[in-house]
Image (cartoon, helix red, strand yellow):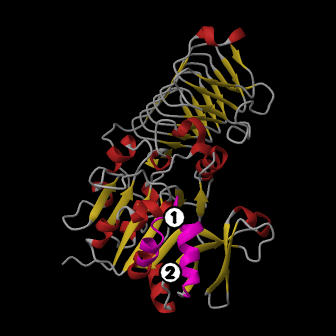
Amino acid sequence: MIKKEMIAMLLAGGQGSRLGVLTTKVAKPAVSFGGKYRIIDFPLSNCINSGIDTVGVLTQYQPLKLNSHIGIGIPWDLDRNIGGVSILPPYEKSKDSEWYTGTANAILQNMDYMESFNPEYVLILGGDHIYKMDYEVMLDFHKESGAECTIAVMPVPWEEASRFGIMIADENKRINDFEEKPKNPRSNLASMGIYIFNWKTLKEALITNKDVPNLDFGMHIIPYVHTQGSPMYAYEFRGYWKDVGTLSSYWEANMELIDLVPEFNLYEEYWKVYTKSDVLPPQYISAEGEIQKSIIGEGTSIYGKVINSVIGCGVTIEEGAVIKDSIIMNHTTIGANCEVTKAVVAENVTIGDNVVLGAFEEADNETHPHIYNQGLVCIGENTVIPSNIKIGKNTVVSGITTAEDYPDNCLESGKSFIKAGEKA
């Protein structure tokens, strides 16, 4: 019988609604990051760098791009005969078929997959954070402490602690209590949503709670394991960790990559970040082209000026265009003499000539102020913006638009323009 010491289950089915139009057609873990990467590359690279060669990726929402990106796992050396990477969507069963309804319900529905490797330990991961972590060190801590469940935690500023699931632990890091988003936190150790379970403990907890609606780790499984008196420990992580779940945090995390000494280094030899790379020609910068403090993906042609920005692969920036403090994703074209400031432009977008993104005074977004804020302009995948248009701050545009869609050739700050058939 196959026996693996530890397998990983990577939860990658999330919609990521706080990223707005960036996740209308793609699951959050498949969103581009840092030029040539996708968000899911980070936990997958952590797995192979930590010596974990068996990873189940649980997909559900808009999985097409995610599935084709992962393929059979070649970039991460996860194309194995035994183990490797497996895509695990919900599937039809003889009875009780359902979509994944919660984080733990998704794991429960893949009990047979986990059982087939007869693991001692199961590592549960989210697919939507940017970080580098050696899970082997966490496993050593788990074994040494005699834990049945270890939760990765990170110290957060006390004033932010009420936004997180908070663990209360003693001086040996044994967890005595925990609170979900407490008003008056008693600790600042925030759960990172990364867990190591003894397989026997996890299996028993999942089977006992299998009928709980929307079965969730934070809400149900962790409290259940705690009430059973099972030893639970907090593993403190002090490296870089970024939740890129909102548009503004996603923009900030990309901008941090281009600091002169970035806190998060994509290019360390000893801890590589792997990704599926298309075979593309090198970057082309014309005689008039100018680049300052930016990341530029392969196959990109720059005839204009790029300042403090993250540019994906296969992008064209025409002559006279100025891109500043922006993220431009793969295979997008920016026309001549455009001014693009503090914009997040998704993949396969076409922007005409003389377009201004980030014009006018700032105003709150009228439809989704909790998503489109911080002065950002967000342009959805496959969008077309005609020439000679000015678009304000805290705006969103998605769909194939024409000049008739813009009164006075403008979209004022705070406006949302989602073409019929598209979703905000």
Identify the residue at image location x=75%, y=26%: 413
Residue 23 to residue 332: above or below: below
- The picture places residue 299, in percent across and down from the top left corner, at 39, 35
- Give the percent coordinates (x, y) of residue 303: 51, 26
Residue type at mark 2? Cys
Q: Report the disc number at residue 149.
A: 2
Please tell me which residue is depicted at 70% across the width and 16% down the height of the picture: 410
Q: CA distance from mark 2 to mark 1?
A: 20 Å
Which span is picked out in magenta? 204-229
In this picture, residue 285 sits left or right of residue 20: left
Res. 212 mark:
1
Q: Quadrant of the N terminus?
A: bottom left
Q: Few, some or many C-alpha atoms within 10 Å of disc 1 (few <14, some 14-19, many ≥20)?
A: few
Query: Residue 180: x and y, percent?
Result: 68, 67
Residue 416 picture quarter: top right
Residue flagged by tag 1: what amino acid is it? Answer: Val
